[in-house]
Amino acid sequence: MTSIARVALVTGAARGIGRTIALALAQPGLMVYINDVAPPEAAAETLQEAEAKGARAAYLPFNVADLRQVEQAVEEIIKKSGRLDILVNNAGITRDQLLVRMREEDWDQVLAVNLKGAFNCLKTAAKPMIKQRFGRIINISSVVGIMGNAGQANYAASKAGLVGLTKSAARELASRNITVNAVAPGFIETAMTQNLPEKTREAMLAAIPLSRFGAPEEVAYAVAFLASDQAAYITGQVLHVNGGMLMA
């Protein structure tokens, strides 16, 4: 059996982009913990595919917005695997509404999962990383966090906050050989974008110089690069994966 060289935790990884990220990281020598709040059967296929690529994989359900649950999860990872090398803060939700119609709970829920959840995981995972003097932390932001978007004030604020969290944590943790970066996807081809009205899709595509939506794999490969040894001298950066929609 292949020995474990690296241990990763990917939040919100039972499906969607998180699932694709977990599979992009999966390789022999990696133990990947797949987090979500969905029932275990939702992650079964992801676990099987990760193991088929030679990785070891386990499902770890917890709510990132609950600090105690996060602490218990990281304690379990350290108890079972002895270390935690890679954290990908991908878990996120949307509660879209125009600003003047947005309910307080819509604001609070999005910030709790998208921003506080990332803070909870980063803060907790940083402790074992500091002790082992190694870590790779990647936060999944969004082009919306940079540009803003009508009807998504809560989501935009949470993703913009992730950029500030990324840069601040990168400065604090660099001396311990821990890098902290963000990936900011643009419009990615998902079930949601596939079901949009054709005129809406055309308008969205018109704003993208490459004239197409991104593939989930293109986001995942960016994350995998930042988690790799080849990215050891990159920290505090936001990697934009948006087809030229935003050129920072």
Image (tube, rainbow, N blue to C red):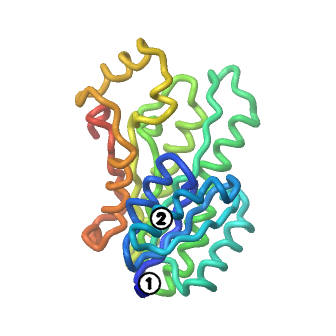
Going by the numbered disc 1, the residue's amino acid type is Ile
Dot 2, crowdedness within 10 Å: few (<14), some or many (≥20)? many
Closer to the eye: label 1 or 2: 1
Going by the numbered disc 2, the residue's amino acid type is Ala
- Secondary structure beneath label 1: loop
Position of residue 168 measured from the top left corner of the image (x, y, whole percent): 46, 61
Which residue shows up at 44% across the image and 84% down it? 4
The quadrant in which residue 121 appears is bottom right
Position of residue 67 measured from the top left corner of the image (x, y, whole percent): 71, 64
Q: Is residue 164 left or right of residue 40?
A: left
- Secondary structure beneath label 2: helix
Dot 1, crowdedness within 10 Å: few (<14), some or many (≥20)? few
Label annotation for residue 169: 2
Which residue shows up at 26% across the image and 26% down it? 211
Query: Would you place residue 188 above or below residue 91 in this image?
Result: above
Query: Would you place residue 20 above or below residue 207 in this image?
Result: below
| Nearest the eye: 160 or 106 | 106
Which residue shows up at 49% across the image and 43% down it? 160
The quadrant in which residue 24 appears is bottom left
Q: Are marks 1 and 2 in contact (CB under 8 Å)?
A: no
The residue that mark 1 highlights is 4
Position of residue 173 measured from the top left corner of the image (x, y, whole percent): 45, 73
Which residue shows up at 51% across the image and 46% down it? 16
Which of the image's four quarters has the N terminus? Answer: bottom left
Upstream in sequence: badge 1 or badge 2: 1
Query: Would you place residue 85 above or below residue 222 in this image?
Result: below
Position of residue 83 measured from the top left corner of the image (x, y, whole percent): 52, 83
